[in-house]
Amino acid sequence: MGVGKTTIGKMLARELSLAFIDSDHEVETRAGANIPWIFDVEGEAGFRERESRVIDELTQLEGIMLSTGGGCVLRQDNREWLKSRGFVVFLDTSVDIQVARTRKDKKRPLLRNVNHRKVLTEMKKIRDPLYAAVADLRVFVGDTGSRRVVTGIVSKMAQRGCVVD
């Protein structure tokens, strides 16, 4: 959350000539409702079920850059699909940066009416090992500009033979 998945994902997709798809946006489009509404009506479990169906379908497509919601790695099936069907870049950052970037955001259901630092710290503790298990590449996103992050990702992918020039 607040790491820049959408911004960096769109830039990276352009750089690699791929179509960009955001799984959260796709869930909203298919549901005809935004994520906070889905959480309110169906709870996190309902949202995660919708998310898994979308992740399964989208990871079977070729020529795309998929940005997933931060919690998608909580489900084993999602982790398996991501790992086996694509190249996974884990955008990592500090809790301090996440807190700064999300402090005014009222659209994130898991951060409503809670201590952001406490919740984000707990999420990081649970999710980081899951992200690390599926990631082909882990990139720390600090205060570095998005363009520099994208350039670094492309360079590391090229070193691994994953980018066609």
Image (cartoon, rainbow, N blue to C red):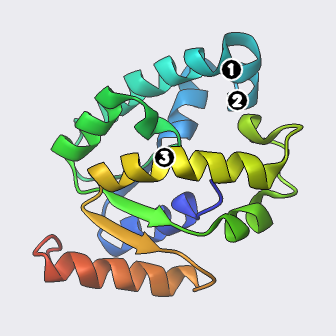
Q: Distance between the residues labelled 2 and 1?
A: 6 Å
Q: Residue at x 40, y 29 (%)?
A: 75
* Number of residues whose C-alpha sits closer than 10 Å to that of mark 3, classed few (under 14), some (14–19) or many (20 or more): some
Residue 88 visible in the snapshot: yes
Using residue 81 as the reference point, say whether residue 33 is left or right of it.
Answer: right
Amino acid type of the residue that numbered disc 3 sits on in the rendered structure: Arg
Say which residue appears at 53% left-offset and 75% top-offset.
Answer: 141
How crowded pointer 1 is (Cα within 10 Å; few <14, some 14-19, many 20+) is rated as many
Coordinates of residue 106 in the picture (x, y in percent) = 85, 44
The answer for how far apart the CA atoms under marks 1 and 3 are is 22 Å
Q: What element carries label 3?
A: helix
Eyeballing the image, is 46 above or below 111?
Answer: above
Report the mark closest to the observer, 3 or 2: 3
Would you say the residues marked 2 and 1 are in contact, meaning their CB atoms lie under 8 Å apart?
A: yes
Q: Residue 34 vs residue 58: left or right?
A: right
Q: Residue 127 carries which label?
A: 3
Element under disc 2: loop
Give amino acid for label 2: Asn
Q: In this view, does 151 lie above or below 94?
A: below
Residue under numbered circle 1 = 38
Q: Residue 86's x, y, as percent?
A: 21, 50
